[in-house]
Image (cartoon, rainbow, N blue to C red):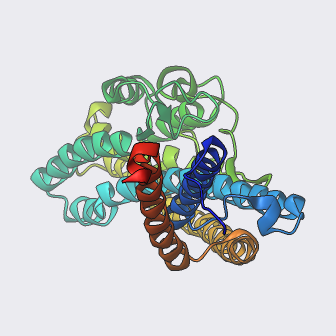
Amino acid sequence: MQLTGYPDLLSFTRRNRTTANIKARLDVAAQEAVTGQRADLTEATNGRVGNAHLLSKALNDIEQSSRINALSTTRLDMIGQGISGARNAMNGIDTRALIAINSAGTADVETIADEAKANLRSVMSALSSKQGTRNLFSGDAVDQSPFADVDILLDDIKNIMATAGSPANIESALDSYFDDPAGGFHTNIYTGGTDAAPPLQIGDGQKLNVDLRGDNDAIKDILRGLAVIATAESSGNAIGTSAFTEIFSSGITAAANGTSGLISLEGNLGIASETLEKANSRNQFEALSLNTAYQSLTGRDQFEAAAELKQLEVQLESSYIITSRLSDLSLTNYLR
């Protein structure tokens, strides 16, 4: 006759060990159900953990490259907005100024002169745009505003108008002011750096140089044209005289050249923007391919993990019930 004894300490310990094992498996299943990744990479990859780590690093590199690309794209967009804002601020003033001077109407010319002052402020404001604390048109001096106050420029040009003399001398003085590195524009107005800003980072070690400073020729033409139109009366020549017309017309020509130059700059920025878009598309494609490979190596079906999690919960509950019943058994209860 075989007797079955009541549970001893050894069997009770085994039951606790089984319960602990179920709890451990349950924790793993819960993690995998949430993350969709195998908790044990060594087991999941059949010992090829190195491959998984290489794929993970490649994905991290692409993610970092994409973040850098996004920052560069934002910066380039803001530079483009500054140039577009400056061009839009012109509002076709060169054409209307030409009509006004040809009509010989004093009021019309004075109206255009007042508008030129307002447009000059708008242009310089648009080209003083910043990305955070970075001044976008200050070259390598990103912590400095690209321009001094607009009134300083207007005062300088008024002084040239009043003192240079003939239209030819005024034109020569303006050339020196805007084009000579030691001229008034570079010493009094443009306050940015003389070298290019740091290149835009595309990612993966690639860079994109966008050297667009406030002393660019197209920008100087815009500022020169508007300042001359705004201050031509300071030359002392009456509106309608040949001398005034020559001075005023030189401002119109500079403004028109500047507008054309800004349009060309916008085209160049569009090419740079396309380069960034291609880099971003390449990153997205590579990330998709690498992520697919990584998931096939380390991924866990989340529905399958959830089903296992439910099954383990039932097992754990049953184990607790059995353990509880066993712990209540005694010789007295057994003999009843």
Residue at x 52%, y 50% (from the top left corner): 75
Residue 251 at x, y = what percent? 40, 49
Q: Which of the 4 image quarters holds residue 3?
A: bottom right
Q: Residue furthest front?
A: 1
**Which residue ends up furthest to the left in the rendered image?**
107
In the image, residue 163 sits, relative to residue 2, either above or below, namely above
Above or below residue 313? Residue 136 is above
**Position in image of residue 202 (x %, y %):** 69, 56
Report the quarter where the C terminus lies. Answer: bottom left
Q: Is residue 203 found left or right of 24 in the rendered image? A: right
**Residue 136 vertical placement versus 159 (above, below):** below
Q: Residue at x 25, y 37 (%)?
A: 233
Kindly identify the residue that appears in the image at 87 percent across and 64 percent down.
51
Residue 228 can be seen, yes or no: no
Left or right: where 215 falls relative to 196: left
- Nearer to the camera, 287 or 208: 287
Q: In the rendering, at what x and y percent does residue 64 appear?
A: 66, 52
**Lateral position of residue 232 relative to residue 258, left or right:** left
The count of marks equals 0
Q: Decide which of 228, 185 is in the foreground and name it.
A: 185
Where does the N terminus fall, quadrant-wise? bottom right
Q: Nearer the viewer, residue 248 or 121?
A: 121
Task: Please tell me in which quadrant of the rendered image residue 63 appears.
Answer: bottom right
Residue 110: percent from left, percent from top: 16, 47
Asked if residue 116 shows in the view, the reply is: yes
